[in-house]
Image (cartoon, grey):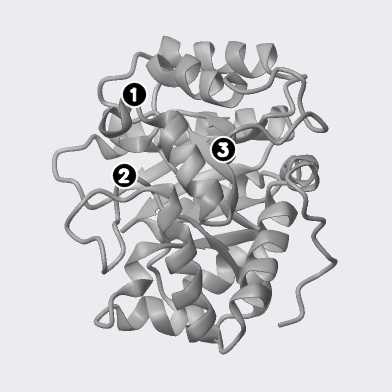
Amino acid sequence: MLVDTHCHLDAPEFAGEALLQRRQALAAGVGLIVVPAVEAGNFAAVRALAAAEDEAGPGAGSGSGARCVYALGIHPMYVDRARDEDLDLLRQALIAAADDPALVAVGEIGLDGFVPGLDADRQERFLAAQLRLAREFDLPVILHVRRAQDRVLKHLRRCRPSGGIAHAFNGSHQQAGAFLDLGLALGFGGAMTFARALQIRRLVSELPAHAHVLETDSPDIAPAWRHPGRNDPAQLAGIAEVFAQLRGLSVERASAVATANAVRVLPRLAAWVRWAGHTPGGEPSA
């Protein structure tokens, strides 16, 4: 079973299609989809996706599509329009969801050094505050680290959340090792399907087995066969095939390793993975 560890299924590009996308994802072998929030205004939307099928939690029926779980956070590209009070709203939302097994992380949070004009100081302040919330609520983090790996690492070393994922990773081997040493995994998706993405493909093939989780970042970062069109969670099956080829593994083994890694760094996924009919093994060894 595949876990899409990063998918914005609540995005406007999927308006009215959430159930269709979940059904298509499940048909492609994707059993779980992690939907991270990006601002206070969509906290309710990501919670609703997780609650749409089944209020009962792990152990209920298989339903009609891949199961959604969620994360709550304020994305670095949204902090310029966020209010300071939104951090209080995030804390209140985390308190309200304390007993919700579908809440699996604080995210998407982090830093973005690519988009011009963003307030870097405000980004750092929001990241630091959200890392403290992750520590307070003992939740892992889903991190945006675009052209900001070293700055994000500085904050992680200060605050030490309980693991998580550096999403859409595109740093150096040294930076990758630093994230792994802090107990995080690295997210890989559509970018690695392009033959010209030499650095990312080297990271996929050369990093240790415990390093990788799989993601789509739908509707963004479409794989080569969809570029420049819209990405969707069902494409994770093809992404997993490329991942397996780069790792020199069968698709089944590569998928099992990535799923076990996802459960390790997002521990609340474990119950949902069992619910979806797959029990991950111990520490990956491939």
Picture disc at residue 219: 2
Which tag, 3 or 1, sits closer to the chain's start?
1
Label 1: few (<14), some or many (≥20) within 10 Å?
few
How far apart are the alpha carbons under marks 2 and 3? 18 Å
Residues tagged 2 and 3 counted as in contact (Cβ below 8 A): no
Query: Could you tell which of marks 2 and 3 lies nearer the N-terminus?
Result: 3
- The x, y position of residue 93, in whole percent, is 59, 14
Quadrant of the image containing the C terminus: bottom right
Q: Which mark is residue 16?
A: 1
Residue 54 in the image, given as x and y percentages of width and height: 68, 21
Could you tell me which quadrant the N terminus lies in?
bottom right
Q: Nearer the viewer, mark 2 or mark 1?
A: 1
Q: Residue at x 53, y 44 (%)?
A: 142
Work out whether mark 2 precedes mark 1 in sequence or the reverse, and give the earlier one.
1
Q: Are marks 3 and 1 in contact (CB under 8 Å)?
A: no
Instruction: Say which of 48 and 157 sits in front.
Output: 48
* Residue identified by numbered label 3: 65
Could you tell me how many numbered marks the image carries? 3
**Secondary structure beneath label 3:** loop
Residue 14's quadrant in the figure?
Answer: top left
Residue 224 versus residue 183: which sits nearer the camera?
224
- Relative side of 148 to 179, left or right: left
Spatial CA distance of label 2 from label 1 is 14 Å
Q: Residue at x 45, y 19 (%)?
A: 45
In the depicted view, which residue is nearer to us: 65 or 225? 65
Amino acid at the residue labelled 2 = Pro
Dots 2, 1 in contact, CB < 8 A: no
- Secondary structure under badge 1? loop
Residue 112 locus on image (x, y percent): 31, 47
